């Protein structure tokens, strides 16, 4: 049973400047819900109700979002508007939230290592809230938990991307075991199309075993001078400890303007159905 889910949310979101100058990227809304709320809903649906968030400067809005707003709630209490708070109240009731700060943005691997204090010695989920996923039929993290139950190792979610885009992702080399599951042999962070072992790209969903923390501690800074989770997972993959799942559903890269607009259009048309 995996109870904890880590949300690394300390990045600067530079692709969305100036919107993200004072506002966390994770608080940008798709319709009326901020990205991170979709992520917490996915985590809860997968049975992970202990939410651990790695934040940084100018991210306080995230903490306020997962808290009660007394004045506002008092003001709209008993009115029609109150029902607009049902979804967030449900999360606040069912989940606990803990926070730690990454003092310097030294990469996703470093952010995950910073979260160790909130996770301890147990397997945990990781959700990058700017990758908004719509699972079909189950949410993507739930699909990953089902695989973890059969193969209790690190699980990463992957999808096929055009070769021209592999340089934006971590890419895996693996052995196809059927049903969308791969045993991962190697992983490369942001390879050029020539260097890439294929076009199976890692997206922002992971289940990690606590062994990842020591592995990260022993991993050197990689691409861009940042501590890369892909490099640490590569070490574990060589020991046969990483599986990848080609999930069923859709992912929107809401860290980019194109993906954000696509997600908005998708959820808007769904809301009208
Ligand atoms: P990204 O590279 O997509 O996010 O990192 P970013 O750096 O915020 O965005 P851009 O590229 O400047 O627009 C993936 C995830 O890892 C987190 C980010 O918050 C995001 O959720 N992250 C990244 C950290 O928490 N700390 C880091 O040092 C780096």
Image (cartoon, rainbow, N blue to C red):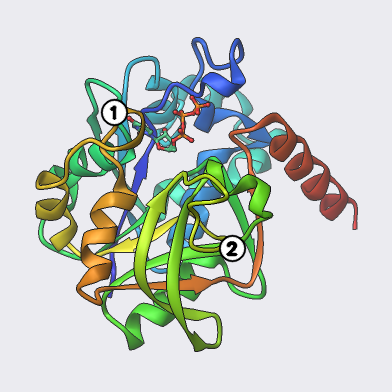
Question: Which quadrant of the rendered structure holds the N terminus?
Answer: bottom left
Question: Who comes first in sequence, dot 2 or dot 1?
Answer: 2
User: Does any portion of residue 31 appear in the rendered image?
Assistant: no
* The disc label shown at residue 159, or none: 2
- In this image, 139 relative to 5: left or right? right
SS label for mark 1:
helix
- In this image, 42 relative to 108: left or right? right
State the residue at coordinates (42%, 32%): 68
* The disc label shown at residue 17, or none: none
State the residue at coordinates (43%, 68%): 173
SS label for mark 2:
strand
- Ligand 1, what quadrant? top left
In the foreground, 196 or 218: 196
Question: Which quadrant of the rendered structure holds the C terminus?
Answer: bottom right
Q: Residues within 10 Å of mark 2 (few under 14, many from 20)?
A: some
- In this image, 42 relative to 119: left or right? right
Q: Position of residue 97 (x, y in %)?
A: 31, 43
Disc 2 or disc 1, which is closer to the eye? Answer: 1
State the residue at coordinates (24%, 74%): 241
In the foreground, 83 or 41: 41
Q: Residues within 10 Å of mark 1 (few under 14, many from 20)?
A: few
Q: CA distance from mark 2 to mark 1?
A: 26 Å
Up-down: is 116 above or below 180?
above
Q: Which residue is mark 1?
A: 225
Image quadrant where residue 208 sits = bottom left
Q: Position of residue 89 (x, y in %)?
A: 50, 45
Q: Position of residue 10 (x, y in %)?
A: 36, 28
- In this image, 48 relative to 265: left or right? left
Furthest-front residue in view?
A: 194
């Amino acid at each position: 049973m995996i109870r904890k889910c880590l949300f690394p949310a300390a990045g600067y979101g530079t692709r969305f400047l100036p919107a993200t100058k004072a506002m966390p990227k994770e608080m940008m809304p798709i319709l009326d819900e901020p990205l991170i709320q979709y992520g917490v809903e996915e985590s809860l649906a997968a049975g992970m109700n202990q939410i651990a968030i790695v934040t940084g400067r100018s991210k306080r809005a995230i903490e306020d979002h997962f808290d009660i707003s007394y004045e506002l709630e008092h003001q709209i209490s008993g009115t029609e508007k109150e029902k607009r708070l049902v979804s967030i109240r449900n999360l606040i009731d069912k989940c606990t939230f803990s926070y730690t700060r990454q003092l310097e943005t030294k990469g996703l691997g470093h952010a995950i290592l910073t979260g160790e204090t909130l996770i301890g010695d147990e397997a945990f989920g990781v959700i990058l809230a700017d990758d908004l996923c719509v699972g079909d039929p189950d949410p993507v993290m739930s699909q990953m938990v089902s695989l973890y139950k059969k193969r209790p190792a690190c699980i990463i979610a992957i999808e096929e991307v055009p070769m021209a885009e592999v340089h934006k992702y971590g890419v895996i080399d693996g052995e196809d075991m059927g049903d969308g599951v791969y045993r991962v042999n190697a992983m490369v962070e942001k390879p050029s199309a020539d260097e890439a072992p294929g076009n199976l790209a890692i997206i922002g969903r992971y289940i990690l075993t606590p062994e990842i923390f020591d592995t990260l501690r022993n991993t050197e800074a990689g691409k861009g001078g940042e501590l890369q989770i892909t490099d640490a997972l590569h070490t574990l993959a060589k020991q046969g400890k990483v599986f990848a799942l080609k999930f069923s559903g859709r992912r929107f890269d809401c860290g980019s303007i194109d993906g954000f607009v696509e997600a908005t259009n998708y959820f808007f048309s769904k809301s009208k159905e």
